[in-house]
Structure formats: structure tokens, C-alpha cells
């Protein structure tokens, strides 16, 4: 089956669906939804097929595709995946079909445009994970921006325009400087070798030792782009706004995949391309990560709005990812990768759950809730499950990642681990306190006023959450499923910063 | 006695055919008055045919219709048809084609005559095409006047409209003023060089170029020429005429004014500053760098505060002038004979091409929206366009995203080209490259603001339906194809190669 360009297929299948939808007459809403979901499911299945032939013991990239694109500058259409990108591609395709299914009921206006945007978004997201040419990577990176801008801005809440402009401007600031860094790197390579061939090729550049000044400048260019996306403290201020205003499915994708683009970028590009700069800056980034972990948790504690609370918890959880990356230990990085997947699943589920309650009450204020356990028992149980997963209950996916990061951090310097562990306790505090106020106690007057509108989860909602429930448990009990995929990428990463091992180069 | 040999006829064929087409359209209109549709078809088919002729005559060796042709000369070398002329001619003809397609749909409901519009446009374009191949200072100046005079008329075309008259008068006064300054500069250069032929100018000034001290008179000539040229491309601080002239003119004319004369003025800069005065580049480069930075920054900052889309696009076109000038600055700052010299000019040419497509497209959408008289170009006219006319809404978003520089659209490739050229030179131009991207970011704010109105605001109560005429539709599709598909593997490589061939002419010549 390796004859077919599988990565191209999985990347551009959603585009095909989007084009198909564009030709469906506007009133045929059911057909539009059906085609969108069908495309997303098909893409999901293809991404699972990738797992079949994937060899976890083979080094380097698999399913490679290389075609010259702009030969004058050595730009190629070059795709390939390793275990890390494969896991993230599957996460993306999973969350996309879930999000599209979850949008059926809430999105009633301009369904056609919505579904087209969502499928284009998927193209960009998958493309980022599979591109091995920096020019191509940049194109996919920016491609993600436009549909998300529309999704928040058109189908979002009351303050959506402010939120979406803020989201775009923040992200553009980072990515344009990254473009300069990419070009600077390509030109330096061209000047040194006298040829443009390979000057945008990730695998070639990875082994090319850039001089320290350029490394530092380019590191900063890349780092800003990724740190804003993750988002790291103090670049996180766009996130709560974007989450609060985005429609439910938008939030799921935002938390589930878009934030991972940042983490992926740091692991794939920032550190291996500029190892010396990464070593030099690592302590600063570790400090910022710790601040993010603690700050996110403290701010989440006092949020009156459910969605905002989950948004700030993301800042805290993603702090573990950046911490895990920049302590440069095996456990740390494995933990960071696991945490990315787990956070994608768990936070995605939490946003879906907030969406469920918002659909019924059109409100997200914690103070107005209370006693949901009595009226929506199934909902309360599922919510409780994901709250526990999010606060890293052993046995569920959230635990393994954070635990591994803590182990790595302890190896790095025990006080770092101590601070991070403290923040985990804060995490338990804000999540459980929120859960208590929303689910237990007397049914609040506000909810009682809604009467029979407050029915339990329907079948579609259960269907969107079921796979996430299973995955949370599966990856919690058998983290090896994922860790096996990560072994070789983690080794590559550590080799690039190990100092002792030099990969090729001059 | 001038011999009309084959080279003369072939080299002058494209501009002459444009003049003939203009005359033909006027005669057609006299014989069959009021047949706007047929006129548009005739004009656009004629232009397409001239484009085909230009492509065949070439010389565009990279596409290889006729291989290995260095170029033709006419009138003893006063006019030359080389790869650069061919590139610019094709670009200018494309600009005319789009304008002629979009124009009538806007003019007709307002009772403005279409034949005169088309004819004046074509006269202006023929002037621009003569600039592209001018190798003589006198021809350069005459062609420049042939370009701008019809432009003044077009700007004041809606003569009963106060804003149009105001804009046209400003354009005319500042335009003739700058022409005079430019002419004065030419005279001084002629005084020192003793010839008007551009290659001879370069040759005869070469003696002084090596000296540490360039004669003060020649420097003054350079300063005057720079000022005159800066007026024509509307570089800050010589841009004051643009916003009023652009806002007042009929929208299709604005589209033309923001691209046609600008491309022509850059052609003039290439022929004059790069080809004739390239050896003095150390003297003019610092000004170009400063002007480029000022132009893009100020254009963007002022565009931020505009509520009228035409005016916003006017300031955005000033910003884009700045980006294009970076290409010139790269040529100037690069070491003589280095690869970066040519890269800068390639970037300039490619940017001009991409800019023409996306900017004309954006203006075409504004024109289509304003087809019904009384619809203003205020940003509020765009409210809810996504519901009222999804086609226009998608296209406008496409053009705006391209102007903003979102990959893989044409505007992104163009910016990418300019920035990579700047980074090749290094030094101060690294800073210029960073300033360029920071500006691109600022641009995001005002371009996306229009997108917010298109997609995220509801239409005004009782907003009339939007009808797009057939010709406008064709024009929009052409512009969209250029903007959307240029990144395709073979396509981008071809266009890069054509720009490279055109740029190489100047490098070999200087």
C-alpha cells in the first residue's frame, strides 16, 4: 500500500470534501452536514490506515513524498511522518470528526460556510504535522489561521470580533517573524553551500550547524511563533478570549489541536534546528513554563465562567508540555508528548461538556449552576470522569504525562518538580471546587427555571464523548501504546541537544 | 531618414497596436453609438490579441516560443524590445484588460461614456509601454507624459462629481509639477553626460563614477530625478495626491491608477536609475532605503484609520509601493556583480505582477459592489456581503488575504521574494526585512477589518441585491486565477523564470 501518496491523501481529503460542499445548494443543510461528517470520518479512517504500515522501529521519516516545487529556491513538496507526527495526525482527525458531529445541533446558520471552514482547517492542521519542507510547513501553518478566524468571528459569541482579531494578530506577529527566520536560515545555507538545493529541507538543515548569532535570532523567531500558539505565559492572553467566544467545536479544536501545533513546532523545529540556542535559553523557558503552570492554575481558581476556567487550565497544562520539552530528559519529553495527546483529548472533552450545558442554559456562569447531578445524572458522571482525568488521576491519561514530566523535572533540578507538583494540587482544587459548585448541592433557581429544557445528554452528544472516554482510559492504563511511537523521535530529539552526538553537518 | 526595417516594426508593434485599438474603439463608437457590450468585447479581445502578439514577438526565451532572441532596437536604439520590455508590456496589457472588463459595468449606470474611457485608458497604456522600452531620455519623458495626461482625464472623468474634480485637479497639479522637476533632473543629467541615449549616458558617466567626488550638478540632477520618480510611484512623503485622487475617481479608474502608472513609474526607474545610473547606485541607494521604509510604514499606519475602502486601498497601495521599493533597495545595496543584485530586481518585477493581480481584483470587487449608483465605498457597504453575494465575498476575502500576504496566495509569494532578496544582502537590509514583516502585520488589521464586515456583520436593512455584470465577472475570475493559483509547481517556477530573464537584461546592461 506504500505506492499511494498516503500523506497527501490524508492531508487533502478534507479539501476535496470542502470543494464538494461548495457545490451543494444552500438549503440542503442535511446533505452538507452529511458530506462534512463523511469526509472527516473517511480522513480519520485513512489516518488509522497509516498506523498499519507504520514501523515503530524504523528511524527517520516514513511515508515520504518528495516532489520539486520551486526548484529555483530548492523548495520541495516534501512530506513524511515519524511516531510523534503520526500520533498528532490521528489526534487531529479524531477530534475533527467529533467536532463536526458536535456542531450539528448548535450551528444552524450558514452551515455550508461553517463546514467548509472546518474542513479547510483540518487540511492546515494535518499539513503542519506532515510537512518536512519549511516553506511548505509555513504555508500550512498560516492556512490554519484563516478558517479559525472565520469560525470564531462568524459563529462565535457576543464579543467574537474582538476575540478573533486578537487571535489573528497575536498569531501573525509570531508567524511572520518565523518567516524571516526561515528565509534567513535558507539563505545562510545557500551562502555556505553555494546552492539552493536543500535550503528549505528540514532534514538537511537539521544537521547544519548554524553559527551562534543566527541560531539565537532564528530561535527567537521560531520560538515566538510557537510560544504564542502553545500559549506560554506571558503570550497567553489571546487564549481565554478566543475560547470564550469560539463556538464549542471551535474551542475543542483550538484546545485539542491548535495549541499542539505550538508544542509540535518546539519539538520538531526549534530545538533540533538551533540546539545551542535552545540550551542557552532553556532555563528562561523553564521559568516561564513554571510561571505558566502556577499562574494558569491560580487564575483558573477564580474564574466565574466555566469556559474561561477550562481555558486557563489549558495554560497550566500546556506549561507542563513546554517544561517537559526544555528540561531535555527522556522522561520529560515523553511526558510532554503524552501530555499533548492527553490534554487534546481531555480538554477537548471538557469543552464539549461545557457546550452541552451551554446548549441548554445559554449560560456558563458557575454561580448560576448547582445540583446538576439530580437532573442530568449521565452528564454529571461523564463530567466527573473528565474532571478527574484533567486533574491527573492515576489510571487516566492526564496522569501519565504530568507524572513523567515531573520525573524528568526532578532529574533536572528537584525544586522545579516541587513547584510543578504544587501546581497540580492547585489543579485539583479549582477543578473539584468547580465540579462541586456545578454538579452537587441543591438544584439552583436558575436551572429550576429552565424546567424540562434541562434534559440529560442526547445520543449525539454521548456519541461525541464516547471515543474520548475510551481513549482517556486506554492511554491512562496503557501509556505504552503511545510511548512506543515516541521512543525514536525522543531519541532523535535528545541526540540533537545531547551535545555529545553530532548529526552529520559541517 | 528612418528605416522601417523588420526590427523596428516588430519592436514597436505592441504599443502601436494598442494605439490602433484605441482609435478603432472610438471609430466603432461613432459608427454604432451606445453599444457598450460589443465595445467591451472588442476592446478586451483586442487586448488579448495584442498580448498574444507580444508574447510571440518576445523576447521571452524562457517560455521558448521563439528561442534565443536578444531583442530588437528601433530608431537607432532609442527604443528597445528586450525581455524586460516584454515582461512589462505583458503586465501593462493585463492591467488594461482587467480595467476594460470592469469599467463599463460601473460607468454605464452613471451615464458615463465607455468608448472614451477605453480609448484614454489605451492611450495611457501605450505611453506606459513606451516607457518600458525607452532607451532615450527624451523618449522617456515623452512617454511619461503620454502616460499621465490621459490619467488626469480619467481621474476627473465623472466631471459632475465634486470629489472627482477635486481629486483630478490635485492629481494634475502635483503630477505636472513632478513632471517638471523630473524634466529638470533629466536636463542636468544630459548636461553632464552630453547624450540622451541611456547606454551612452551610462558609458559617459562611467568616468566620473569611479571618482570619489561626483560633480555637484549631477548629484542635483539625481536628487531631482529621485523626487520626480518618487512622486510618480507615490512614495512617502510625495504621496499626498494619491488618497484624494483615488477616492474621487470612478472606482475602475482608481484600480487602474493604483497599478498602471505605478508599474510604468517603476519601469522608468528601472530604465533610468538601474540601467543608466546604476553605477551611481551608492549615491541613490540610501534615499531609496529610507523612502521605502517611510513609504510602507506611513502607508500602513494611515490605512489603519480609514473607513472608506477605496481610501484604505489607496493607502495600502502606498504601503505596497514601499515593499516594491525594497526590491530596488536590494539592487542598490548589493555588491556590484553579486547574485543579490539581480534577486532584488526579480523581486521588484514579481511583486509588481502579483500586486497588479490582487489589487485590481480588490478594486474590481469594490466597483462591482458600487454598480448601482449611490452605493458608497464606505466600509459599511460591505456589511453582510457574505450573505448578499457569496461570490463577491469570497473573492474579496481572497484578494484581501493576498494583499495581507497569507500563503500560498500571490501576495505571499511576492513578499517572500522581496524578503529573501533583502536577506541575501544582509547588513541594514536585514533590518528592512524585519520592518517589512512588521508592516505586513499592521496590514492584517485593516485588511481583516473589511473581512469582518463581509462575514461577521449583518447586512443593512433593505440593502439592494448585488448584481455582477458578465464582463466584470470575467475580470474578477482572471484576477482571482492569478492570485490563487500562482503557487502551483510549474506556474510559480515559470513566472519566477520570466521575471529573472527580464531582470537579467538590466544586470548585463549596467
Image (spheres, coloured by chain):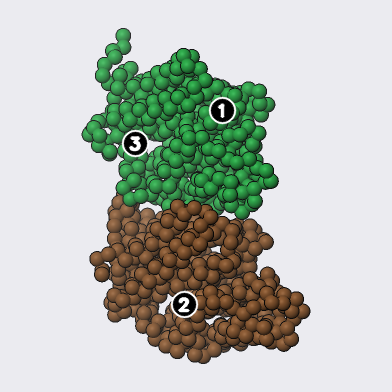
Q: Position of residue B509 (x, y in %)?
A: 32, 32
Image position, residue B349 (x, y; %): 41, 39
Q: Position of residue A501 (x, y in %)?
A: 32, 76
Q: Indicate the secondary structure of the residue bearing disc 2.
A: helix
* Corner quadrant of residue A102: bottom right
Where does label 2 land, which residue?
A: A341
Q: Residue B173's mark?
A: none
Figure chain in brown:
A
In three-dimensional space, the C-alpha distance between marks 1 and 3, rounded to whole angstroms, equals 36 Å
Q: Residue at x 51, y 46 (%)?
A: B391
- What distance separates the C-alpha of mark 2 from that of mark 1? 58 Å
For mark 1, does the 10 Å Cα neighbourhood hold few (<14), some (14 to 19), or many (20 or more) residues? many
**Which of B305/B372 is in front?**
B372
Which residue position is annotated with label 3?
Answer: B502
> Residue sitting at 47 percent across and 64 percent down?
A34
Question: Which part of the image, by quadrant, shows the N terminus of chain B?
Answer: top left
Q: Residue furthest top?
A: B1
Amino acid at each position: 500500500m506504500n505506492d499511494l501518496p498516503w500523506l497527501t491523501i490524508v492531508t487533502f481529503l478534507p479539501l476535496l470534501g470542502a470543494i464538494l460542499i461548495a457545490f451543494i445548494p444552500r438549503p440542503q443543510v442535511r446533505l452538507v452536514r452529511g458530506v462534512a461528517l463523511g469526509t472527516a470520518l473517511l480522513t480519520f479512517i485513512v489516518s488509522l490506515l497509516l498506523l498499519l504500515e507504520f514501523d515503530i522501529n524504523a528511524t527517520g521519516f516514513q511515508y515520504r513524498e518528495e516532489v520539486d516545487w520551486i526548484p529555483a529556491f530548492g523548495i520541495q513538496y516534501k512530506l513524511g511522518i515519524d511516531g510523534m507526527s503520526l500520533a498528532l495526525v490521528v489526534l487531529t482527525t479524531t477530534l475533527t470528526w467529533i467536532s463536526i458531529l458536535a456542531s450539528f445541533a448548535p450551528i444552524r446558520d450558514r452551515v455550508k460556510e461553517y463546514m467548509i471552514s472546518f474542513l479547510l482547517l483540518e487540511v492546515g492542521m494535518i499539513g503542519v504535522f506532515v510537512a518536512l519542507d519549511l516553506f511548505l510547513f509555513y504555508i500550512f501553518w498560516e492556512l490554519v489561521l484563516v478558517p479559525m478566524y472565520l469560525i470564531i468571528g462568524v459563529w462565535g459569541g457576543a464579543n467574537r470580533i474582538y476575540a478573533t482579531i486578537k487571535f489573528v494578530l497575536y498569531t501573525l506577529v509570531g508567524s511572520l517573524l518565523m518567516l524571516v527566520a526561515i528565509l534567513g536560515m535558507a539563505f545562510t545555507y545557500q551562502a555556505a553551500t553555494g546552492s539552493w538545493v536543500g535550503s528549505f529541507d528540514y532534514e538537511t538543515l537539521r544537521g547544519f550547524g548554524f553559527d551562534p548569532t543566527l541560531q539565537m535570532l532564528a530561535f527567537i523567531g521560531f520560538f515566538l511563533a510557537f510560544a504564542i500558539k502553545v500559549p506560554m505565559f506571558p503570550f497567553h492572553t489571546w487564549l481565554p478570549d478566543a475560547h470564550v467566544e469560539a463556538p464549542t467545536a471551535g474551542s475543542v479544536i483550538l484546545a485539542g489541536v491548535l495549541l499542539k501545533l505550538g508544542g509540535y513546532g518546539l519539538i520538531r523545529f526549534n530545538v533540533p534546528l538551533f540546539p545551542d540556542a535552545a540550551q542557552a535559553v532553556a532555563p528562561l523557558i523553564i521559568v516561564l513554563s513554571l510561571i505558566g503552570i502556577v499562574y494558569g492554575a491560580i487564575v483558573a481558581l477564580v474564574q466565574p465562567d466555566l469556559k474561561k476556567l477550562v481555558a486557563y487550565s489549558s495554560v497550566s497544562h500546556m506549561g507542563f508540555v513546554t517544561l517537559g520539552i526544555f528540561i531535555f530528559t527522556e522522561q520529560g519529553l515523553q511526558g510532554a508528548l503524552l501530555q499533548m495527546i492527553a490534554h487534546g483529548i481531555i480538554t477537548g472533552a471538557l469543552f464539549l461538556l461545557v457546550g452541552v450545558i451551554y446548549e441548554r442554559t445559554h449560560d456558563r456562569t458557575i454561580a448560576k449552576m448547582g445540583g446538576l447531578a439530580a437532573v442530568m445524572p449521565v452528564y454529571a458522571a461523564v463530567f466527573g470522569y473528565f474532571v478527574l482525568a484533567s486533574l491527573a488521576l492515576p489510571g487516566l491519561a492526564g496522569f501519565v504525562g504530568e507524572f513523567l514530566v515531573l520525573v524528568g523535572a526532578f532529574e533536572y533540578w528537584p525544586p522545579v518538580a516541587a513547584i510543578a507538583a504544587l501546581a497540580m494540587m492547585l489543579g485539583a482544587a479549582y477543578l473539584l471546587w468547580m465540579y462541586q459548585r456545578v454538579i452537587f448541592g441543591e438544584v439552583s433557581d436558575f436551572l429550576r427555571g429552565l424546567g424540562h429544557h434541562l434534559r440529560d445528554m442526547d445520543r449525539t452528544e454521548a456519541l461525541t464523548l464516547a471515543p474520548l472516554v475510551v481513549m482517556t482510559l486506554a492511554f491512562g492504563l496503557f501509556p505504552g501504546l503511545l510511548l512506543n511511537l515516541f521512543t525514536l523521535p525522543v531519541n532523535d530529539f535528545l541526540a540533537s541537544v545531547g551535545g555529545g552526538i553530532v548529526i552529520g553537518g559541517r | 531618414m528612418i528605416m522601417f526595417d523588420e526590427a523596428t516594426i516588430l519592436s514597436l508593434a505592441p504599443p502601436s497596436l494598442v494605439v490602433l485599438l484605441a482609435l478603432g474603439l472610438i471609430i466603432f463608437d461613432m459608427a454604432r453609438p451606445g453599444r457598450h457590450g460589443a465595445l467591451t468585447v472588442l476592446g478586451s479581445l483586442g487586448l488579448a490579441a495584442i498580448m498574444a502578439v507580444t508574447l510571440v514577438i518576445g523576447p521571452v526565451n524562457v517560455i521558448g516560443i521563439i528561442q534565443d532572441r536578444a531583442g530588437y532596437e528601433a530608431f537607432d536604439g532609442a527604443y528597445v524590445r528586450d525581455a524586460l520590455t516584454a515582461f512589462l508590456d505583458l503586465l501593462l496589457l493585463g492591467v488594461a484588460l482587467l480595467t476594460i472588463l470592469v469599467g463599463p459595468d460601473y460607468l454605464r449606470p452613471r451615464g458615463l461614456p465607455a468608448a472614451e474611457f477605453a480609448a484614454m485608458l489605451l492611450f495611457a497604456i501605450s505611453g506606459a509601454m513606451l516607457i518600458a522600452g525607452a532607451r532615450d531620455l527624451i523618449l522617456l519623458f515623452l512617454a511619461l507624459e503620454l502616460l499621465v495626461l490621459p490619467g488626469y482625464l480619467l481621474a476627473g472623468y465623472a466631471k459632475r462629481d465634486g470629489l472627482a474634480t477635486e481629486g483630478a485637479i490635485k492629481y494634475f497639479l502635483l503630477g505636472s509639477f513632478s513632471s517638471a522637476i523630473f524634466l529638470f533632473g533629466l536636463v542636468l543629467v544630459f548636461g553632464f553626460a552630453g547624450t540622451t541615449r541611456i547606454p551612452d549616458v551610462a558609458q559617459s558617466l562611467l568616468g566620473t563614477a569611479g571618482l570619489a567626488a561626483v560633480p555637484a550638478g549631477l548629484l542635483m540632477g539625481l536628487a531631482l530625478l529621485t523626487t520626480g520618480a518618487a512622486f510618480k510611484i507615490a512614495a512617502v512623503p510625495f504621496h499626498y495626491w494619491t488618497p484624494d485622487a483615488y477616492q474621487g475617481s470612478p472606482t475602475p479608474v482608481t484600480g487602474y491608477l493604483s497599478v498602471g502608472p505605478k508599474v510604468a513609474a517603476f519601469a522608468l526607474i528601472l530604465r533610468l536609475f538601474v540601467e543608466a545610473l546604476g553605477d551611481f547606485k551608492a549615491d541613490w541607494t540610501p534615499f531609496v532605503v529610507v523612502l521605502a521604509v517611510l513609504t510602507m510604514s506611513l502607508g500602513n499606519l494611515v490605512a489603519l484609520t480609514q473607513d472608506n475602502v477605496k481610501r484604505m486601498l489607496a493607502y495600502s497601495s502606498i504601503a505596497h509601493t514601499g515593499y516594491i521599493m525594497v526590491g530596488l533597495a536590494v539592487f542598490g545595496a548589493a555588491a556590484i556583480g553579486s547574485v543579490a543584485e539581480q534577486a532584488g530586481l526579480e523581486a521588484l518585477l514579481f511583486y509588481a505582477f502579483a500586486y497588479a493581480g490582487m489589487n485590481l481584483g480588490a478594486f474590481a470587487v469594490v466597483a462591482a459592489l458600487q454598480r448601482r449608483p449611490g452605493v458608497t465605498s464606505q466600509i459599511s457597504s460591505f456589511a453582510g456581503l457574505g450573505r448578499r453575494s457569496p461570490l463577491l465575498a469570497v473573492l474579496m476575502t481572497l484578494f484581501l488575504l493576498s494583499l495581507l500576504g497569507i500563503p500560498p496566495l500571490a501576495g505571499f509569494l511576492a513578499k517572500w521574494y522581496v524578503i529573501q532578496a533583502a536577506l541575501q544582502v544582509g547588513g541594514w537590509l536585514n533590518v528592512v526585512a524585519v520592518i517589512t514583516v512588521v508592516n505586513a502585520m499592521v496590514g492584517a488589521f485593516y485588511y481583516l477589518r473589511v473581512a469582518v464586515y463581509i462575514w461577521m456583520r449583518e447586512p443593512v436593512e433593505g440593502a439592494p441585491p448585488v448584481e455582477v455584470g458578465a464582463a466584470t465577472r470575467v475580470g474578477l475570475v482572471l484576477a482571482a486565477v492569478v492570485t490563487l493559483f500562482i503557487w502551483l509547481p510549474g506556474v510559480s517556477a515559470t513566472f519566477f523564470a520570466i521575471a529573472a530573464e527580464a531582470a537579467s537584461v538590466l544586470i548585463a546592461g549596467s
